[in-house]
Image: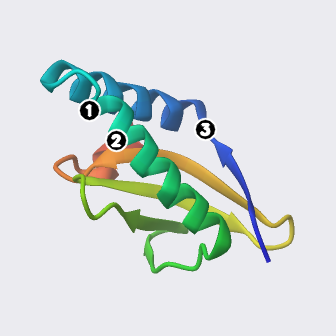
């Protein structure tokens, strides 16, 4: 069963900030990050049942980049809600409080 992905505006902003950061480091690197992230999101749509890290938030770490996709799953609606794509150096609880 495949799930539908819904991205929160904050997650879209997180992704754009990461793309911008990597493009500042090397032109084209942001595009590579985005393509890599998209592969992970497609994989997530097939199997979203990762460990719950806190409250009802699940996390899916990217192997090549220091980011985690933070999401919740609604099994009744077959929908994955992506709330953020955070750099692992940031404290996720601090992010959620803000």
Q: Nearer the viewer, mark 3 or mark 2?
A: 2
Residue lying at 40% horizontally and 33% vertically, measured from the top left? 14
Residue lying at 57% horizontally and 50% vertically, measured from the top left? 82
Mark earlier in primary sequence (3, 2): 3
Give me the C-alpha separation between circle 1 and circle 3: 24 Å
| The image quarter in which residue 47 lies | bottom right
Mark earlier in primary sequence (1, 3): 3
Residue lying at 42% horizontally and 34% vertically, measured from the top left? 15
**Image quarter hosting the N terminus:** bottom right
How far across and down, in percent of the image, does residue 27 sit? 23, 21
Residue tagged 2? 33
Q: Is residue 52 left or right of residue 91?
A: right
Give me the C-alpha separation between circle 3 and circle 2: 19 Å
- Callout 2 crowding tier (Cα within 10 Å): few <14, some 14–19, many ≥20: some
Judge by depth and name the residue closer to the eye, 93 or 63: 63
Residue tagged 3? 8
How far across and down, in percent of the image, does residue 16 sit? 41, 26
Q: Nearer the viewer, mark 1 or mark 3?
A: 1
Q: Is residue 49 left or right of residue 68?
A: right
Residue tagged 1? 29
Label 2 SS: helix
| Pointers 1 and 2 in contact (C-beta within 8 Å) | yes
Residue lying at 16% horizontally and 49% vertically, measured from the top left? 89
Note whether 36 is above or below 71 in the view shown: above
């Amino acid at each position: 069963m495949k799930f539908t992905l819904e991205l929160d505006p904050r997650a879209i902003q997180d992704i754009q900030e990461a793309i911008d950061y990597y493009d500042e480091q090397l032109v084209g690197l942001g595009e590579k990050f985005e393509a890599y992230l998209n592969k992970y999101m497609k994989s997530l749509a097939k199997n979203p049942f990762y460990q719950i890290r806190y409250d009802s938030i699940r996390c899916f770490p990217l192997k090549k980049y220091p980011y985690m996709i933070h999401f919740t799953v609604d099994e009744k609606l077959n929908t994955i809600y992506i709330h953020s794509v955070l750099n692992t150096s940031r404290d996720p609880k601090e992010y959620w409080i803000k």
